[in-house]
Every structure is written in C-alpha cells, then in structure tokens.
Amino acid sequence: MKGWLTGFIAGLLVLPLIGFCYLKLGYAPVATSAPPMPFERYFAQSALHARIDKEMPQKDPTPVTESVFMAGAMTYRDNCAVCHGLPGQPQSAIAKGMFPRPPHLFEGHGVTDDPAGETYWKVKNGIRLTGMPGFEKSLSEDEIWQVSELLAKADKLPESVLKDLKETQSGQK
C-alpha cells in the first residue's frame, strides 16, 4: 500500500512538472499557423458552451423586422465583417491570419442554427483566445441584439437586406 501511495504522489508531482517544462521550454504551439495542442478544441469548446448555456438570454427583446435587420447589417459591416466576411466575398487578410479562423457567417455553417441569445452572448462578451472581442463597452444593447437577430436569420434575410450588404461591400452605396 505504501508503494502505491508513493507512486500516486510522485505522479501528481511529475505531471505538473512535465506540463510546466512543455510550456517554459517553448514546445507549446503558440503561432497562428501551428496545430492546436492536444485536447485544446475540446476543452475550449466545452467550457464555452457550458458558460453560454448558463448565461445566455432566453428571451430576445428585439422584434424581428426588416428595419432591425437593416440596422444590424450596418453594425455588422462596421464591426464584424472584417473578420467574419460579407455575402459572396472571400475572407479578408485579417481573417486568414487568425487562429482559430473566424467563421464566415454568411457561408456554410454559420450561426443561423444558434438561438439569437447565444449569438448575443458571444457578441457582448467575446470569446477568449480566439480574437473575438467583446462589444459590451462599444455597442449598445439594441445594436448587439440587432446583429444577433441578423445572424440568427442570416439564411432567411429579406432580399433588401442582402442587397444592402452586397452593395456596400463593393462601394456602390
């Protein structure tokens, strides 16, 4: 029994020492071009989703109207498009250099399957170690909700809103 306990205590001391050396000796991947650390995605996404599930608003106070989408589109263009793109446009140079890469929210799997409250939480609070800033201090509650509604319904937007997003990307407006 004594040998087992000694081995257990030694294991508890050796594992943190190995982790410390891994980080201090420069073996951890920290460049945006490096692959993720073992279990990095799993732990980061598990923690993020647990926190969002706990704190995201369940009820959206914003009525879903075309004017809300238009206001959300303006805020999105000014604050989000540089990383998350616009409909029909390729990723920006900034987005290509980020790790993890920000999702293109108007192509493929964006946030249209997420409740608006989840997107609201992400926009308001940001997401650590991803480059996603929190906009709580720079956007109003209404602006955050407008962008959240725009993105939650990105696959069902009125043609006028899509047209507005596409026209402003090419400087036609």
Image: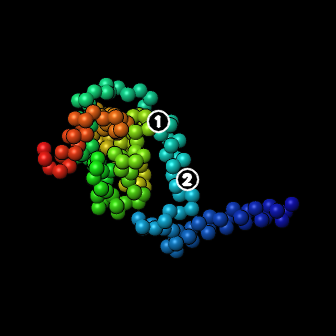
Q: Please state which of residues 156 and 12 is positioned toward the viewer in this rendering.
A: 156
- Extreme bottom residue here? 25
Q: Furthest-right residue in view?
A: 1
Relative to the observer, which residue lies in front, 159 or 115?
Answer: 159
Q: Neighbour class for label 2 at 10 Å: few (<14), some, many (≥20)?
A: few
Q: Which residue is mark 2?
A: 42
- Circle on res. 55: 1
**Mark 1 surroundings: few (<14), some (14-19) or many (≥20) residues within 10 A:** few
Across and down, in percent, residue 142 comes to 28, 32
Q: Quadrant of the N terminus?
A: bottom right
* Type of amino acid at the residue the image marks with label 2: Tyr
**Is residue 130 shown above or below 165?**
below
**Which element carries disc 1, helix, strand or loop?**
helix
Residue at 20%, 40% in the rendered image: 164
> How many numbered marks does the figure carry?
2
Closer to viewer: mark 2 or mark 1: 2
Position of residue 3 relative to residue 59, above or below, is below
| Residue 5 shown left or right of residue 23 in the figure | right
- What residue do we see at 23% from left, 43% from top? 165
Q: What x and y, as percent, mark residue 158?
A: 27, 33
